[in-house]
Image (cartoon, rainbow, N blue to C red):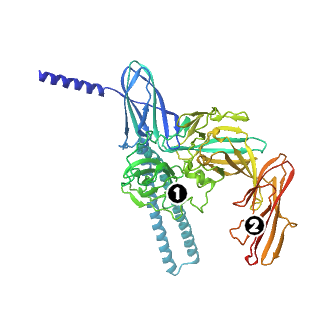
Amino acid sequence: MIKHKAIFSLFISLFLVQGVFAIDTTNVKSKITDVTVFFSGAQITRNSEIKLAKGKHFLLIKNLPQELNPQSIQVKQFDFGKILSVKHSLNTENDSKKSIDELNLEKKIKDIEFKMKEINNKLSVYTLEEQLLNDNREIIKKSNGSTLTELKETADYFRIKLNEIKLAKLNLYKEFENHKESIQETNVKINELLSQRKKTYSHILIAIEVVKETSVKLNVSYFIPSAGWEPLYDFRVDDINKPLSITYNANVFHSSGEDWENVNITLSNNNPTLSGEKPDLIAWYLDRNNPYEKPIVQKGAGTIKGKITDLENDEPLPFANVLLMKRNEQITGTMSDMDGKYTFTQIPTGSYTIQTSYVGYVPKSITNILVNADKITFVDVKMEGSVSLNAFEVVDYEVPLISKDQTSSGGTVTREDIATMPGRSAASLASSVGGVNGDVFETFGYNQNIRGSRSYSNDTYVDGIKMKKNTETTDFITNTLKETATNIEYKIEIPYSIPSDGENYSLKIKEVTLPVEYLYNAIPKLEKDVFLSAIISDWTSLNLLSGKSSIYYQGTFTGESFIDINSVKDSLTISLGRDNNIIVTREGNKLLNDKKIIGNNVKENIAWDIVIKNNKNTPINIVVEDQYPLSERKTIEVILLNSSNAKVDSKKGFLTWNLKVESNTKTNIGFNYEVKYPKYSNLKVD
């Protein structure tokens, strides 16, 4: 009985195994249709439709990015069937079989090399013939008895023959160089094919079962780290009697290895890499180490950029295979473009190795490349020509004496540098770029400012813009805003194509036009020009994110700034630059200025006249600031005699006038103070 049970079990097992292997595997062609881009990383959604018969099927999606996170793979359920399993794998075997195109190109190189050997042989023969003629010429020179006619004929012969030889050698040299260029061009084509064949891809194998013959709409999504976006704003003002226009833009980038062609893009400020679980408290004993203390580890991501060139002639090497390694494991890979350039973005901080290979060159491995948060590490690779591809040339990375990405005090950051900075977070750039002012968040205040909204705000919003009576216009560019409990998402309704090259591609999100308060500021003691600012009091209704901004006043670009939402409290002040239509002058009042010596003391009366002239056709509001000196010594006395109704800060000696100046008029203000001090002090009091 036991024997019969064993035979029956074996039969059932063989039947099941045979049934599994009988299931066909279908290669599925899918297309990227939707991408949700986060500040760091992106979720890719692929769709395909395939007609399947009733039963079980294996569906294989090949050649996906190696870097995709296997735990993030999601397959959406479909009608008339169910998903049995989802498996991720890497094609680590790297198909070693050469394609017909590769074999044909290699044969072409061998044929060219054979022709180059023939040229070398011909050159050798011509060189010997040239040497023979030169030797015979010396013999004839030494011989006597030759007539003039014979010498002339001999000279003509040697001249004609040597010219023929040199011209033939010149043509052979030219032909040889043409063959060398042809080999280089063929190597480029081989490397392009080789980079695709040896590239590591991810595969997703999906086991499904359908209950009847149907067309299955397959929806697969996954997360990749090498993508991101950063907010950008354009602030435009035509005149101070017109509203402020704000254009919301985004710089989107990725280097995932697969181009996004005509995809629906959603921009999100969410960070899916952060844990959604709350932390737990740990018992804290004063006589023990703090349980929450952790070793200081630099977090964040950086960028590696470089160029692959020929060591001998510094020519770029396109389609070179570039691998990013860590602890002998491949993290990701790419290939150089037509200019030999390559880019790795969103690389976690740490130490890496770059390996480069190119047909006809010695492979090179550069070790100890340190990637810092929000920094660009430049790694240029010069490769030496060779027919061997077996051994790697290993080189330690050397940090440049002058860092191209240095942004510490004393450096200069150009507009182009800012555009290519790897720091995609707000905090990484806030300290290096100035121009937008706001109230600093109080240290012990607990009002939360999240995405431009506040915890105590109960107003009504439409597409992120607070609806209020004095808002003139709101112009949206066919995009919608979805605000959830944890994040903001902008859905771009126009499909975009973004190649996988790590470069920034600008997307326009929306435009908003709103009235603001325009205010002029002048400190005539320090600067003759007058500065215009736009004050947005209800900025929380705009759902602004921290990011870079460009300022335009009357159609002219006036500079770049940075909005740090976390440092703004009640109002957002945007500097719009200088306005030459407002003139402020500051001159000493000769009638009131006076200096007297009384005994051992000096008594001086200092007076200043300030004139504000408004040459515009509209009235303006202007804040004028000045100061008078303060004294910390009892022997020196300062008395403010007149301030023309200025707001006086006696602790700092500051004077502030808030004025309204009508169009094409001028306003006079002034102040004077008295200083008493000993004669020996020799003070400068104006």
Residue 196 in picture, x, y percent from top left: 44, 43
Q: Secondary structure at mark 1?
A: loop
Name the residue nearer the viewer: 104 or 420.
420
Dot 2 or dot 1: first in sequence order is 1
Please name the residue that numbered disc 1 is placed on. 315
Specify the quadrant that holds the C terminus.
bottom right
What residue type is disc 2 on?
Val
Q: Quadrant of residue 474?
A: top right
What residue type is disc 1 on?
Glu
Name the residue nearer the viewer: 435 or 103.
435
Residue 316 in picture, x, y percent from top left: 52, 55
| Left or right, 326 with reference to 10 | right
Name the residue nearer the viewer: 555 or 315.
555
Cα separation between marks 2 and 1: 72 Å
Please name the residue that numbered disc 2 is placed on. 638
Can residue 155 be seen from the camera position used here? Answer: yes
Q: From what the image shows, is residue 380 above or below residue 204? A: below
Residue at image location 83% in from the left, 72% down from the top: 595
Residue 460 in picture, x, y percent from top left: 64, 32
Q: From what the image shows, is residue 516 above or below residue 646? A: above
Residue 263 in picture, x, y percent from top left: 55, 35
Q: Nearer the viewer, mark 2 or mark 1?
A: 2
Residue at image location 85% in from the left, 46% down from the top: 617
Q: From what the image shows, is residue 610 above or below residue 11? A: below
Residue at image location 15% in from the left, 25% down from the top: 6
| Left or right, 197 with reference to 314 | left
